[in-house]
Image: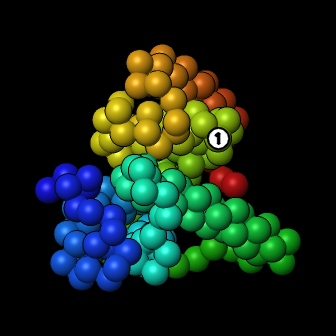
């Protein structure tokens, strides 16, 4: 079922079936987008997106519901990243080391470490990009179409390809600088 086929006024008036249909349709995409942005916090943030839709749906009648969901998700993701950076700087100032038992869920501690390091490198590279460039990449790798990306960003669909190509080049440069700076394996922090 397409999002626009579900009347927003049904969601606003508390139509459980309409809300449930939207949830099932969009939750996997919203979760995927947030996972690429914030990692393990994605589930909580995706739920928050749908709580906001349920309790405070968009007021504009002509609102593109999908674009609204993605914008809310992106804003929540950026807020979580900022909060995480503040927490990391406090932790580092106290001299604490990040430790966790998550490695036990991996096949080996080495596999866990490699996966985490790659995530750190990608997130560091995204953080070096302009906000719009990072957002373009996260949206595209969340399997959004050019039309959907254009709706979220408020740009012409015909410009998305060019904007993505520029964002990919910027990401490659940022990622390359980080790998060179930290060493081939990503190095220690």
Q: Nearer the viewer, residue 78 or 111?
A: 78
| In the rendered image, the vertical position of residue 40 relative to residue 155, given as above or below | below
| Furthest residue toward right | 93
Residue 171 appears at what percent x and percent y?
56, 30
Is residue 36 visible to the viewer in this orientation of the structure? Answer: no
Q: Identify the residue shown where x is 28% and y is 72%.
A: 10
Q: Nearer the viewer, residue 87 or 151?
A: 151
In the visual, does 5 lie left or right of 53? left
Is residue 18 visible to the viewer in this orientation of the structure? Answer: yes
Q: Identify the residue shown where x is 48% and y is 64%.
A: 58
Residue 8 appears at what percent x and percent y?
33, 64
Q: Identify the residue shown where x is 69% and y is 69%.
A: 83
Crowding at dot 1, Cα within 10 Å, few <14 / some 14-19 / many 20+, comes out as few
Residue 42 appears at what percent x and percent y?
44, 67
Q: Nearer the viewer, residue 146 or 175?
A: 146
Q: Which residue is mark 1?
A: 131
Residue 64 appears at what percent x and percent y?
40, 49
> Would you identify the image quadrant in which residue 92 lies?
bottom right
How many numbered discs?
A: 1
| Helix, strand or loop status at disc 1 | helix
Q: Identify the residue shown where x is 31% and y is 56%.
A: 29
């Amino acid at each position: 079922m397409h999002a626009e086929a579900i009347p927003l006024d049904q969601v606003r008036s508390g139509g459980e079936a309409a809300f449930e249909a939207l949830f099932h349709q969009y939750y996997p995409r919203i979760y995927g987008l947030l996972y690429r942005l914030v990692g393990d916090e994605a589930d909580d943030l995706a739920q928050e997106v749908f709580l906001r839709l349920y309790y405070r749906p968009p007021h504009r009648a002509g609102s593109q519901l999908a674009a609204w969901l993605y914008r809310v998700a992106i804003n929540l993701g950026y807020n979580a990243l900022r909060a995480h950076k503040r927490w990391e700087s406090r932790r580092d100032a106290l001299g604490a080391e990040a430790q966790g038992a998550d490695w036990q869920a991996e096949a080996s501690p080495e596999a866990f470490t490699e996966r985490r390091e790659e995530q750190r490198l990608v997130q560091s590279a995204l953080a070096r990009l302009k906000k719009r460039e990072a957002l373009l990449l996260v949206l595209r790798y969340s399997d959004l179409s050019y039309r959907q990306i254009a709706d979220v960003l408020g740009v012409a669909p015909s410009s998305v390809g060019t904007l993505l190509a520029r964002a990919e080049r910027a990401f490659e440069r940022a990622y390359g600088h980080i790998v060179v700076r930290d060493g081939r394996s990503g190095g220690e922090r």
